[in-house]
Amino acid sequence: MGYGSFQNCVRSDGFCIRITILTEKPETKMSSIPYASYICLLCGHIYHEAEGAPDDGIPPGTRWEDVPPNWTCPECGARKEDFEKMD
């Protein structure tokens, strides 16, 4: 089954429906940027993007910029701003 979309239009000569069918699934571009790790400057806890924080509702593969701003360190409660990217 192809992917498609439709659009309704009203013309002076009546009602019509325009349908566009794509024969191939649109490409999903995967990021080629490697996963990074971030360390809590207060307690040393490490957040690994590849692992996420499932116990906190953050699935594996979640990039640091996509971690909610109100997320806190599960070890000491430090804020996201208290983490630093590791080399």
Image: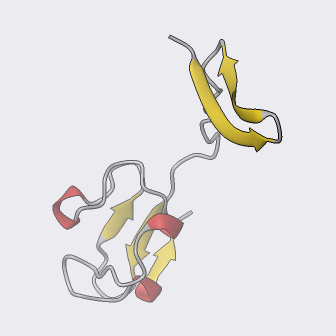
Q: Position of residue 58 (x, y in %)?
A: 30, 60
Out of 39 and 50, give the one closest to the viewer: 50
Q: Residue at x 23, y 62 (%)?
A: 57
Q: Image quarter for residue 77?
A: bottom left
Q: Position of residue 67 (x, y in %)?
A: 42, 69
Q: Answer above or below: position of 68 versus 13.
A: below
In the image, is 43 to the left or to the right of 87? Answer: left
Q: Answer above or below: position of 4 versus 65.
A: above
In the image, is 55 to the left or to the right of 42? Answer: left
Q: Image quarter for residue 31?
A: top right
Q: Position of residue 26 (x, y in %)?
A: 64, 26
Out of 43 and 49, give the one closest to the viewer: 49
Out of 87 and 64, give the one closest to the viewer: 64
The outermost residue toward the right is: 12
Give the quadrant of the C terminus. bottom right
The image's colour scheme reads secondary structure
Q: Residue at x 64, y 14 (%)?
A: 24
Q: Residue at x 60, y 25 (%)?
A: 4
Q: Residue at x 21, y 86 (%)?
A: 76
Question: Total number of numbered labels?
Answer: 0
